[in-house]
Amino acid sequence: MKLFECQNCGQLLYFENVTCEKCGHRLGFNSETLSLVTLKETGDGWKPVGNWRGKVRFCRNAQERVCNWLVPDSSGEDYCIACRLNRTIPDLGPPENRALWQKFESAKHRLVYGLLRLGLSVPSKTEDPKGGIAFDFLSPQAEPDGVITGHESGLITLNLDEADDAKREVNRKNLHEPYRTVLGHFRHEIGHYYWDMLVAGGPWHERYRRMFGDETIDYSSALQQHYQNGPAPGWQRNFISAYATSHPWEDFAETWAHYMHIVDTLETAEYFGVKIEPRAGRKGANRMAIDYTRMASSFEAMLEGWVPLTTALNTLNKSMGQRDLYPFVLTPSITAKLKFVHELIADSAQPARA
Ligand SMILES: [Zn+2]
Ligand SMILES: [Zn+2]
């Protein structure tokens, strides 16, 4: 994720900011240029400060305090490109639901930023009923049959309970997962969507099968078997997570999510000017200035930055008494799958917008 700067006063700004802490100007995110824009209110609406022409509007979800994205005033849209994807939001009657929904929206907006950043198209089901994306955010308290997180032809269902840290932690522990986050769920489920869009039946399908396995094996029995027996011993050599072993579709979605984690974290490190220069073990250690923009040209270059960065991040977490930020080990076989995702995206993406 990039860092931003107030166009009025030069203050450092973050993706989620809605006002400038220093000068108090309202801020909005422009999804065309992927930048946070400083706004001033004119008699008839909001305008970016500076020489910009044209008015902008806030996404209707700004009223709900779950979105800071903009819509061009000339467009007929009420919602921003990220909020247009919502088909069902939780019932905001129960007071706790609003805070949980806010967590979902925060992760969803970061997801959409990440997809746009990679040059991927993010159509809603309203504009493209067959090939678009829609989210159902469902509270299990309101669904008599419960809520199963998953993806089906662009429709992504997410269980609102996962935004509750205590409940998510219980699930994490029961499923023996080292890592479970709301953002991870979004990135995983969207991976299934892009498998449908970019892999299924296309020029990448054969290569996918050679690397991830034959996805035509029965999905529900594969999953059932996974939950009954767990992953095969030694799975860590070939899979980024135990869940990835359950079916080649899940392996792809887990790998896709992981690739998005890497890109976002490397870009954040770049914007903070992070350099890894350990003051010990000078002979063996990797020394690296994290520069995602340069590293994005090849997956090998990204890894060169990623490995020393995650080593440093894990060690920093230990200093704070926290468990590893990055509880994963990248083996050659996992790296090859990540590279597949990198090349698939590079091949499918439109030229960068920013
Ligand atoms: Zn400012
Ligand atoms: Zn919005």
Image (tube, rainbow, N blue to C red):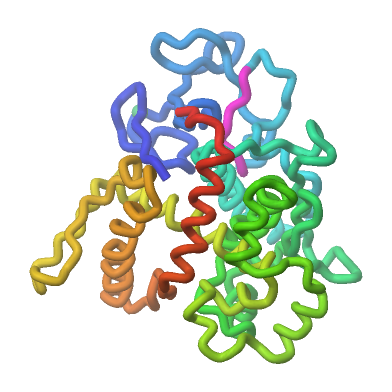
Quadrant assignment for the N terminus? top left
Give the residue displayed 51% in from the left and 76% down from the top. Answer: 238
Quadrant assignment, res 139: bottom right
Coordinates of residue 279 in the picture (x, y in percent)? 9, 67
Magenta region: which residues?
66-72
Is residue 97 a member of the stretch shown in magenta? Answer: no
Residue 269, x across and y down, in percent: 32, 51
Where's the C terminus, which quadrant?
top left
Q: Is residue 19 left or right of residue 126?
A: left
Q: Does residue 55 lie above or below 256 as drawn?
A: above
Residue 70 among those drawn in magenta? yes
Relative to 142, is 8 on the left or the right?
left
The picture places residue 248, in percent across and down from the top left corner, at 67, 68
Give the side of residue 308 with respect to residue 127, left or right: left
Q: Give the percent coordinates (x, y) of residue 313.
A: 31, 66
Residue 327 in the image: above or below residue 349:
below
Residue at left offset 80%, top offset 51%: 153
The residue depicted at 58 percent of the width and 70 percent of the height is 165
Place residue 253 in its image quadrant.
bottom right
Task: Find the residue positioned furthest to the right.
Answer: 144
Along the horizontal axis of the image, is 160 left or right of 183?
Answer: right
Q: Quadrant of ligand 1?
A: top left
Number of callouts? 0
Along the line of sight, the residue nearer the viewer: 315 or 79: 315
